[in-house]
Amino acid sequence: MGAGSMASINCSHVLSKDIMTFNDLGLSPETLKSIQSLGFETPTPIQAQAIPVLLTGERDFVGLASTGTGKTAAFGLPLLERVDPSIEAPQAIVLSPTRELCLQIADDLRKFSRHRSGLRITAVYGGSNIVTQIRELKQGAQVIVATPGRLLDLIERRAARLDQVSMVVLDEADEMLNMGFKDELDAILEKAPEQRVTWLFSATMAKGVARIAQNYQHDPVEISVGGRNESAANIEHYCFMVHEKDRYTALKRILDYLPEIYGLVFCRTRAETQQVAEKLMADGYSADALHGDLSQAQRDYVMRKFRQRTVQVLVATDVAARGIDVDDITHVVHYKLSDEVAAYTHRSGRTARAGKSGVSIALINMHERRRIAELERRNNIQIKLEKVPDARAICENQLLALIHRVVEVEVNEEEIRDYLPPAYEALCHLDKKEIIKRFVAVEFNHFLDYYRDAEDINAKSKPPRREHQPGQQRSDNAKRNRRMQAYDTKRFSVNVGRVHKVNAGAIVRLVCENCNLKSNQIGAIDLGRDTSFFEVSKEAAGAIRSGMNNLTLDGRKVSIRSASGEGRKPQPRRRPRD
């Protein structure tokens, strides 16, 4: 399908209950009955604007809205209305980036179609038995919810038929591209029938998303909630600047300052996620980890504990968190910012869902200050720089939380009655104030002891350095070249580059974190379009070779290879002039 003009609608306003309900959107009585049984009353802005357009099934569509604004219902309700239950063949495909999100979408669609008989919805995704999924497809699924890689595999095995598909939905399109699914998306869209509609939903209008719209949609309607690439308006944004060595200490102080937190902590890598979660659990926090190294059964178990609030803080990678659909998350903490600007929007969007408010907190070191300005500009938000809470503020909040629990606790008069007389007798010599002091001390002494000599860990702010100029990379490389002049070097390649929005710092981090090297052991870095090169001393090359398998950079699988030819030979130091 060729590109065409794009009709654009911006619905940054919030619709009130007096203006519109689901009854006004043109949905069938069966679907309305399902919606009412789920407790939905008023459509969100993206739902109110998208559903009437999609019900016609005549136009391609682009929906831009932050995570948690109800995109699944926005495309799911009209999709189900347009499926014919009498045809036992795939009529609609919904593509999502992760198996968690795939399962969540499939579960939501089943709930939406609860009162419509004959509809079969099947989820297919990697990491699960493909034979079982083939058997489910043969039973006559009309809607396939899939991850791109597994669906393409099933198409090539001729287990998934697309000849009667009239609707293709790309959910979280920007994240699918960030995760490296471009080739799979292209292949699937090429194989889908020409006479179909393509509905594209995304939190941001990244360049890759715009390319899909241009290549595979014709004259699409675009609806934007809150503006392109913007975070939800009901999220407050804060950052705390500390020295790198104090990052974990700062996280603990934030969690202590927020005793009622129900939140997510985002890390960059699987190893870091597991490490932070284990340290929190060892320090007595109600925490657990969610990342790609866990089996599906382990991930389901962790998510079940989190949804039941047995786990109060979930430490996660960006990729694993894509399937988290929990409405009551109060805080999102960026333990380390992602190199991808769009990831900040996706992370923050895990809170403030379903019309609620939320808080996004970023921990940064002094070298990351410029990233905050970039995030503010790109997301049209204000991120307030605050001080890490001190000991007094933390202890006050903990005390108030304790008092609140005491006031709100439910007392079972009958069961507790027989236990009270001995307690009254033991405490009768103390007056009311003394009893209160002692009960508070029992719960509170360990906080007072821990924070008694706590130091100020806030990094002192300095005037920001100038932004990198186009020649900055050459300047950095010049420094690295001077540093490596005395060494015999070896050259390596890595299959990421500018097209993946990777900078030299990301490659340094990749090598240092996975190969146990220090940044001063890395020489010049040459960023290419889709492949980059870097040098290390020959002595350090062995560490590169031993650590270059099963690597990921911000959720993307990468590989390091020895580049052809040797690096540079050591150069003699110049003698100073007399």
Image: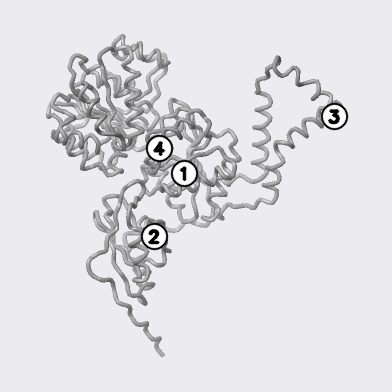
Residue at image mark 3? 430
Q: Which residue in the rendered view is the most extreme toward the right?
A: 429
Q: With respect to residue 448, does 417 lie above or below? A: above
Q: Earlier in the sequence, mark 2 or mark 1?
A: 1
Q: Which residue in the rendered view is the most extreme toward the bottom?
A: 578
Q: Earlier in the sequence, mark 1 or mark 4?
A: 4
CA separation in Å, label 3 and label 2: 63 Å
Residue 5, percent from left and from top: 18, 32
Q: How many C-alpha atoms fall within 10 Å of the one at disc 2: few (<14), some, or many (≥20)?
A: some
- Closest to the camera, between mark 2 and mark 1, is 2
Three-letter amino acid code at disc 4?
Ala
Q: What secondary structure is found at the residue carrying circle 3?
A: loop
Label ID, residue 321: 4
Left or right of 344, for residue 157: left
- Closest to the camera, between mark 3 and mark 2, is 2
Q: Which quadrant of the view contains residue 53?
A: top left
Residue at image mark 1? 334
Q: Earlier in the sequence, mark 1 or mark 3?
A: 1
Q: Quadrant of the N terminus?
A: top left
Q: Which residue in the rendered view is the most extreme toward the top?
A: 29
- Closest to the camera, between mark 1 and mark 4, is 4
Three-letter amino acid code at disc 2?
Cys
CA separation in Å, label 3 and label 4: 51 Å
Q: Is residue 382 visible?
A: no
Q: How many C-alpha atoms fall within 10 Å of the one at disc 4: few (<14), some, or many (≥20)?
A: many
Residue 221, percent from left and from top: 23, 28
Left or right of 246, for residue 11: left
Label ID, residue 511: none
Three-letter amino acid code at disc 1?
His
